[in-house]
Image (tube, rainbow, N blue to C red):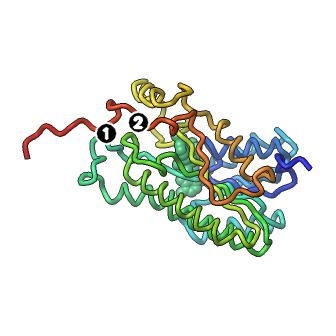
Amino acid sequence: MDTSRIDGQVVLVTGAASGIGHAIARACVAEGVTVHLADVSDAVHTEAGKLSGTGNGTVASHVCDVRDRDAVRALVDDVVAASGRLDIAFLNAGVNGAPSLLQPGGAIDELSFEEWRRVMEVNLDGLFHCLQHSARVMKRQRSGSVVVTASTAGLRAEPRVSYPYVASKSAVVGLVRQAALELARFGVRVNALAPGPVVTNIGGTGPRPASSVAAWEDSIPMRRWGRPEDVAGMALLLASGAASWMTGGVHVVDGGASALTQIGSDALPAPDTTAP
Ligand SMILES: NC(=O)c1ccc[n+]([C@@H]2O[C@H](COP(=O)([O-])OP(=O)(O)OC[C@H]3O[C@@H](n4cnc5c(N)ncnc54)[C@H](O)[C@@H]3O)[C@@H](O)[C@H]2O)c1
């Protein structure tokens, strides 16, 4: 048996219209699976259309906002109604875009509650809904694999990203571990990916300034940002039989960035020199 393959499985990918989710969906189609792409953006239909026929897999697309519990329930029910089961769930939808510690409005006493909730509602509440409904089906099947996209920002403090992003991804790691603990006896594995900086549309702000790109690269031993494909490979590995004894893990994919113990003083907020 080739345990590194996932062919023949029924797969759901959330946040599949763009970036890492799209790369995972593309890799799944190449592996010959039935893949259901879901996204809040209706671009998911176009993107699914483009993937159709690129491999042996079957492609379906769904517009679904992961913040909406009823919509997530309906999404999972639709997948099962169409394909008979749900073997693998890549729970990947996420947002950022709130100001970092180094940007105006990003300090704890400046950050708006609206920005906090905007990120938490997708990254944490949305994941909770997706995990709950995927688990409901997988427990019944007595098999399944869930791969959640967390972040290295969920493993340490990170001045270049926002409070709600770090807090949501830290909570995601806890949710994954707790779910792995519960679901192991049902034959369901739950793992997290923790990517470092990857070139995608996250934040929705278009191309990043060269200074920001360079600052991140300085903290990556491999000296480049990740590509969505770099993360998709690990995602499929975790979902496959090659990872059959792996659950509750957080798997870093970051060009070596986490191997460093410090990121350089230039990435820290400047010392406060003002008098109290
Ligand atoms: N890009 C990075 O540097 C990086 C690093 C670590 C982790 N991540 C994580 O990777 C995941 C994918 O992000 P990406 O970088 O590919 O960004 P992206 O913006 O390219 O893709 C995210 C997708 O999620 C969708 N989405 C957003 N809100 C949604 C909602 N409410 N319901 C359903 N879909 C929704 C978007 O429409 C988009 O298609 C996220 O969880 C993100 O936090 C990204």
Q: Residues within 10 Å of mark 1 (few under 14, many from 20)?
A: some
What residue appears at the point 88 percent right and 44 percent down from the top-left corner? 56
Is the CB atom of the residue marked by disc 2 within 8 angstroms of ligand 1's nearest atom?
Answer: no
The image quarter containing residue 187 is bottom right
What residue appears at the point 8 percent right and 47 percent down from the top-left corner? 276
Kindly identify the amino acid type of the residue bearing the numbered disc 1.
Leu
Whether residue 190 is visible, yes or no, is yes
Pick out the residue farthest to the left. 275
Q: Name the element at disc 2.
A: loop
Q: Name the element at disc 1.
A: loop
Q: Nearer the viewer, residue 10 or 161?
A: 161
Q: Nearer the viewer, residue 223 or 197?
A: 223
What residue appears at the point 63 percent right and 38 percent down from the top-left corner? 228
Place of residue 12 in the rendered image (x, y in percent of width and height, measured from the top left)? 72, 57
Instruction: Report the residue marked by disc 2.
Output: 262
Cα distance in 3D space between marks 1 and 2? 17 Å
What residue appears at the point 73 percent right and 66 percent down from the top-left corner? 188
